[in-house]
Image (tube, helix red, strand yellow):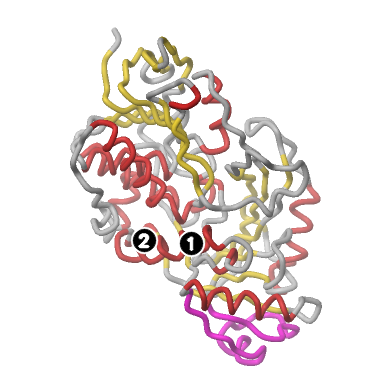
C-alpha cells in the first residue's frame, strides 16, 4: 500500500545521507532510498582524500573554495570519520616549476594555508620520499573514511524522524500534471511512495534517474582505479605537483596506502572496462614519489566513477571539468517537485546537502536554518559506534575496508 513522505531522496551516498540528515534536523519528513548498501556508489569507491582545495586552486577556484571551507567544517564535526594527516605536493625534476609557483600563489589568494620546503627537508619530514623530489609544499589535506561518514549521517537522520532504506532501488517515477506523484521502490521496500518533493542525489547515475522523470541531466562520468598496497608509516597524503594526470595521488592509511588514479571517460557507470594498464600506470607513476610502493604487495584494487556534470562538455579528457556542484531545479523543465544535485566532491558533501535543504525548505515554507556545519555527527568520537552504524546500513566499501571494522552487515 502506498505511503506518503514529504521528501524522497534517491541515493544513499554522502550527499544523499547528508541531505536526509539536514532535512530531518529541520523537522522535515524525509525518506531516503539507496539501491545497494549505503555509500555503495561513488562515495565508498574513491581514494578517500579530504581535499584542501589545493589540487584545484589554480584551475578551478570555485571548486577549491568549496573544498577548503568544508575541509575546515569536517575537522570540527566529523571526528573519526576523517583523519588529519596533512598533505604534501611534491615537485620532481620533470615537473614545471612555474606550475608549483602558480599553485602556491592561487592557494594564497583563496586562503589555503601552505608551507614550502626543500627536497631535503621533505625527505626528513616524510621518510621514504623519493630522493628526486626538488621541493614540496604542505597543505591541509587529510583522509576521509566514507563508510563511516555516510552511515553517521544516516543514523542522525533516523534519530530525528527520517527513514533510511538501503537495498531499495528506485524502479519507476510517475509524473502527472508537471509533478512526480508516485515513486516505486523495489528490494527491501517493494512499495509505492507518494512524495511532495523528490531529490535526485545519485551522482554518476543522476542522468538515468532524471530520465525516469522525463528530464535531462548531462553527466560526463569517468572511471578511475585505486590500488591499496601494504606500506607502513606514510604520514601525509602525497600529490604530484603537476597538471592532474594518471597516478598522482597517494593516500595514507594505517598499514596501507591507496594509490590513484586514472581518468577515463565512460558512458555507463554500471558497465565499463577495468583495464590492467590503469593499475600498472598508477603504480609506476606513484612510485616516482614514493619508490617503495612499486614492489609493495597489493591488498585490494577497485574502480570508482566520478559524478562529473558537464552540460557543455566536449568529448575527450574530462579532468578539466569543474569539481564545483550544481543544484538543478527541474521546474523550468516541466517537473515542479524534482531537484537534482550533481558534481562536487566527497569533501563538499555537507555543503551540497545544505544547498538542497535550503531550497526545499524555502519551497515548503519551513523557516528553519541548517545546523549541520556546527553539529557533530553522532558517534564522531567513538570509532566502534561509527562502525556499528556502518554495519546497520551495510555501508562498508573498499576505500576504508582496512580501517572500518563493521563486521557482518545486518541489512545485506
Q: Which corner quadrant of the image does residue 192 belong to?
A: top left
Q: Quadrant of residue 116?
A: bottom right
**Rendered-image quadrant of the N terminus:** top left
Q: Which mark is residue 50?
A: 1
Asked if residue 78 lies left or right of residue 92, the reply is: left
Query: Residue drawn 35% across and 44% down?
Result: 18
Is 84 situated above or below 175? below
Q: Measured along the vertical axis of the image, is residue 83 above or below residue 362?
A: below
Q: Position of residue 147 (x, y in %)?
A: 43, 48
Looking at the rendered image, the quarter that the C terminus falls into is top left
Is residue 95 part of the magenta span, yes or no? no
> Counting residues from the N terminus, which is met first, the one under dot 2 or under dot 1?
1
Q: What residue lies at 64% left-to-right and 91% top-to-bottom?
A: 118
How far separated are the C-alphas under marks 2 and 1?
A: 9 Å
Residue 65, x across and y down, in percent: 48, 63
- The mark total stands at 2
Q: Which residue is mark 2?
A: 74
Q: Quadrant of residue 158?
A: top left
Q: Is residue 125 left or right of residue 111?
A: right
Residue extent of the magenta highlight: 112-138
Q: Nearer the viewer, residue 138 or 39?
A: 138
- Which residue appears at 61% of the width and 57% of the height? 228
CB of mark 2 within 8 Å of CB of mark 1? yes
Q: Quick check: can you spot residue 408?
A: yes
State the residue in front, 16 or 405. Answer: 16
Q: Is residue 176 above or below residue 332?
A: above
Amino acid at each position: 500500500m502506498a505511503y506518503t513522505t514529504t521528501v524522497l531522496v534517491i541515493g544513499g551516498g554522502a550527499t544523499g545521507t547528508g541531505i536526509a540528515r539536514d532535512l530531518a534536523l529541520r523537522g522535515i519528513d524525509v525518506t531516503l532510498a539507496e539501491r545497494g548498501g549505503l555509500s555503495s556508489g561513488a562515495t565508498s569507491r574513491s581514494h578517500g582524500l579530504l581535499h584542501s582545495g589545493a589540487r584545484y586552486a589554480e584551475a578551478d577556484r570555485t571548486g577549491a573554495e568549496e573544498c577548503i571551507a568544508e575541509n575546515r567544517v569536517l575537522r570540527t564535526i566529523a571526528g573519526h570519520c576523517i583523519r588529519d594527516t596533512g598533505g604534501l605536493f611534491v615537485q620532481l625534476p620533470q615537473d614545471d616549476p612555474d606550475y608549483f609557483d602558480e599553485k602556491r600563489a592561487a592557494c594564497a589568494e583563496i586562503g589555503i594555508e601552505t608551507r614550502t620546503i626543500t627536497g631535503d627537508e621533505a625527505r626528513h619530514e616524510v621518510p621514504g620520499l623519493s630522493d628526486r623530489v626538488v621541493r614540496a609544499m604542505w597543505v591541509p589535506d587529510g583522509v576521509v573514511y566514507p563508510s563511516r561518514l555516510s552511515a553517521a549521517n544516516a543514523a542522525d537522520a533516523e534519530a530525528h524522524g527520517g527513514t533510511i532504506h538501503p537495498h531499495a532501488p528506485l524502479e519507476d517515477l510517475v509524473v502527472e500534471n508537471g509533478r512526480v506523484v508516485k515513486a516505486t521502490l523495489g528490494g527491501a521496500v517493494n512499495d509505492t511512495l507518494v512524495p511532495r518533493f523528490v531529490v535526485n542525489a545519485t551522482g554518476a547515475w543522476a542522468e538515468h534517474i532524471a530520465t525516469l522523470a522525463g528530464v535531462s541531466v548531462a553527466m560526463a562520468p569517468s572511471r578511475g582505479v585505486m590500488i591499496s598496497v601494504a606500506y607502513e608509516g606514510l604520514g601525509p597524503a602525497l600529490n604530484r605537483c603537476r597538471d592532474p594526470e594518471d597516478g598522482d595521488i597517494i593516500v595514507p592509511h594505517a598499514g596501507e596506502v591507496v594509490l590513484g588514479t586514472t581518468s577515463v571517460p565512460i558512458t555507463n557507470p554500471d558497465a565499463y572496462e577495468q583495464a590492467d594498464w590503469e593499475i600498472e600506470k598508477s603504480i609506476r607513476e606513484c612510485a616516482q614519489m614514493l619508490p617503495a610502493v612499486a614492489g609493495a604487495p597489493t591488498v585490494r584494487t577497485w574502480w570508482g566513477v566520478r559524478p562529473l556534470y558537464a552540460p557543455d562538455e566536449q568529448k575527450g579528457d574530462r579532468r578539466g571539468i569543474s569539481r564545483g556542484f550544481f543544484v538543478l531545479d527541474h521546474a523550468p523543465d516541466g517537473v515542479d517537485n524534482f531537484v537534482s544535485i550533481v558534481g562536487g566532491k566527497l569533501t563538499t558533501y555537507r555543503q551540497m546537502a545544505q544547498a538542497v535543504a535550503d531550497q526545499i525548505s524555502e519551497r515548503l515554507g519551513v523557516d528553519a536554518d541548517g545546523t549541520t556545519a556546527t553539529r557533530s555527527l553522532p558517534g564522531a568520537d567513538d570509532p566502534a559506534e561509527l562502525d556499528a552504524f556502518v554495519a546497520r546500513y551495510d555501508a562498508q566499501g573498499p576505500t576504508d575496508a582496512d580501517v572500518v571494522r563493521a563486521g557482518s552487515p545486518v541489512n545485506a
